[in-house]
């Protein structure tokens, strides 16, 4: 089975041991991370999800600082990525996924 453009497995074959390549904060990337969050149960998987959320947080931070007027979407997603990261750290990946899905 082939990986999608963002390096994620298709939704029907999510592999929580795979790390999603985060190049942007598009709906496709967010959906891939949310799907991985929903399938993640092992500590190792949660570490991967935290890294993906860190990447979303960083990219949205760059987007906010490089625009003359911060995008409301990027600013809200930036805060949500931070909260989702905290939820994963609390072993609550399902809640983190639900938070990300609000941006799809």
Image (spheres, rainbow, N blue to C red):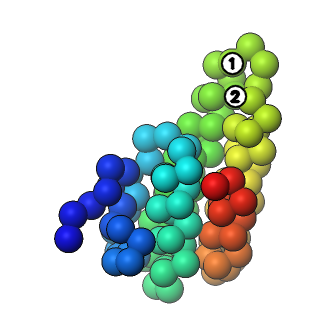
The front one of 104 and 48 is 104
Q: Relative to 68, is 86 above or below? A: below
Query: Which quadrant of the figure contains the N terminus?
Result: bottom left
Q: Is residue 6 left or right of residue 50?
A: left
Whether residue 61 is visible here, answered yes or no, is yes
Mark 2, Cα crowd under 10 Å, few <14 / some 14-19 / many 20+, is: some
- Residue 78, given in percent of the width and then of the height, sits at 70, 44
The CA span between labels 2 and 1 is 6 Å
- Residue 92, given in percent of the width and then of the height, sits at 67, 79
Mark 1, Cα crowd under 10 Å, few <14 / some 14-19 / many 20+, is: few
Q: Is residue 66 left or right of residue 42?
A: right
Residue wearing tag 2: 64
> Is disc 2 in contact with disc 1, using a CB cutoff of under 8 Å?
yes
Q: Which residue is drawn at the image coordinates 65% and 34% (left, top)?
A: 61
Q: Which residue is drawn at the image coordinates 66% and 63% (left, top)?
A: 101
- Residue 10, given in percent of the width and then of the height, sits at 35, 68
For label 1, the SS is loop
The front one of 101 and 15 is 101
- Residue 13, given in percent of the width and then of the height, sits at 34, 77
Residue wearing tag 1: 67
The front one of 69 and 45 is 69
């Amino acid at each position: 089975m082939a990986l999608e453009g963002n390096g994620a497995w298709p939704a029907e074959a999510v592999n929580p041991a795979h790390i999603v390549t985060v190049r942007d904060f598009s709906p496709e990337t967010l959906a891939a991370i949310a799907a991985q969050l929903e399938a993640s149960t092992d500590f190792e998987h949660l570490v991967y999800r935290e890294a993906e959320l860190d990447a979303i947080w960083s990219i949205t931070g760059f987007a906010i600082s490089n625009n003359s007027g911060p995008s409301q979407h990027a600013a809200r997603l930036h805060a949500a990525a931070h909260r989702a990261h905290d939820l994963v750290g609390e072993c609550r990946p399902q809640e983190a996924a639900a938070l990300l899905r609000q941006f799809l």
